[in-house]
Amino acid sequence: MIINNIIDPLFANDPEMEDMSTGSNKYRVFYRSHLDDQGRLTRDEIVDLIKAEFPNRQFQNCLEWSAGVGFMGFDLLDHGVCQHLHLIEKYAPAVESATKTIDTNSLGSKATCQLADSITGISPRQFDLIVASPPQFKTFALYNSSFGEYALENWYDANCERMCVDTDWQEHVDFFAHCLDYLTNDGVIVLVEHESHIAEIETMVTAGLTGRRLSSSMIPGKLTYLILTRT
Ligand SMILES: C[S@@+](CC[C@H](N)C(=O)[O-])C[C@H]1O[C@@H](n2cnc3c(N)ncnc32)[C@H](O)[C@@H]1O
């Protein structure tokens, strides 16, 4: 199902709708202020983590689910951790930024992005690396209570909800129900999750996968990487 085909009216006149670009290596990765979630902070760490955990391994096809503008995926491609990249994201403005990154860096033969809200929207194919920093709270209230400075009574932001809330974990459940269909036998899944609910996420992990946690040193006490492989 396609969620959103146009730029939200909420942001249409936002002066910060100007394109910005960043990159930790060769590529310029485009984004806009309201599309900037934690991937810009964690992309270096996830590149280093995957290199350290899987030394000498070159991944062929990487999928980034819940990709936003693809901060993590484009960096994995840029640093040679993977050869090809497919991004899937439900929010059209983020896909527009990712498309600009692909065009500007002439990545047409290496990277694709797709507007969809489930990995079941991907045509049958297999990935040996799947990464994601999906929404990390099952309610907006829990998001609020985890970030003290924003914990104002009745505070609400639709953009934050899109980025941070997976209502009752429906999107995680959908991901785990179908991820094995897209994972090679030797494939690896790396999820960036909030430490406060990592045990809950682990209960959803599909039979056939086994996982372990690694704490983030970039955002200690908040972020945990869940690394999953086939049993
Ligand atoms: C926590 S943000 C992370 C974005 C990006 N990975 C980053 O780190 O900057 C989660 C992203 O997932 C997208 N999203 C949420 N549910 C999704 C779903 N079911 N399918 C695809 N994208 C989804 C949101 O629109 C948002 O861009």
Image (tube, rainbow, N blue to C red):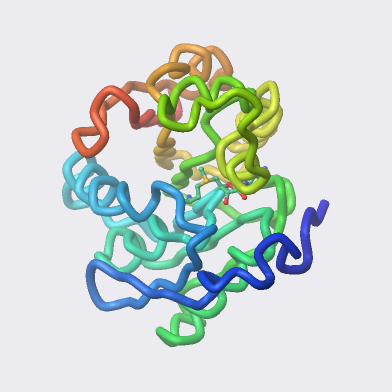
Is 44 displayed left or right of 102 in the figure?
A: left
Is 90 displayed left or right of 58 in the figure?
A: right
| Figure check: 22 above or below 216 | below
Q: Quadrant of residue 166?
A: top right
Whether residue 98 appears in this view of the structure is no
Q: Position of residue 181 (x, y in %)?
A: 63, 40
| Figure check: 65 above or below 165 | below
Q: Position of residue 133 (x, y in %)?
A: 47, 42
Q: Position of residue 54 (x, y in %)?
A: 23, 43
Q: Nearer the viewer, residue 153 or 189?
A: 153
- The residue furthest front is 153
Q: Residue at x 24, y 46 (%)?
A: 45
Number of numbered callouts drawn: 0
Q: Residue at x 54, y 12 (%)?
A: 203
Q: Quadrant of residue 171?
A: top right
Q: Residue at x 29, y 59 (%)?
A: 81
Is 207 displayed left or right of 191 in the figure?
A: right
Whether residue 80 appears in this view of the structure is yes
Q: Residue at x 29, y 70 (%)?
A: 23
Q: Nearer the viewer, residue 11 or 3?
A: 11
Q: Position of residue 223 (x, y in %)?
A: 34, 30
Location of the C terminus by quadrant is top left
- The residue furthest right is 1
| Figure check: 21 above or below 170 | below
Q: Nearer the viewer, residue 190 or 2?
A: 2
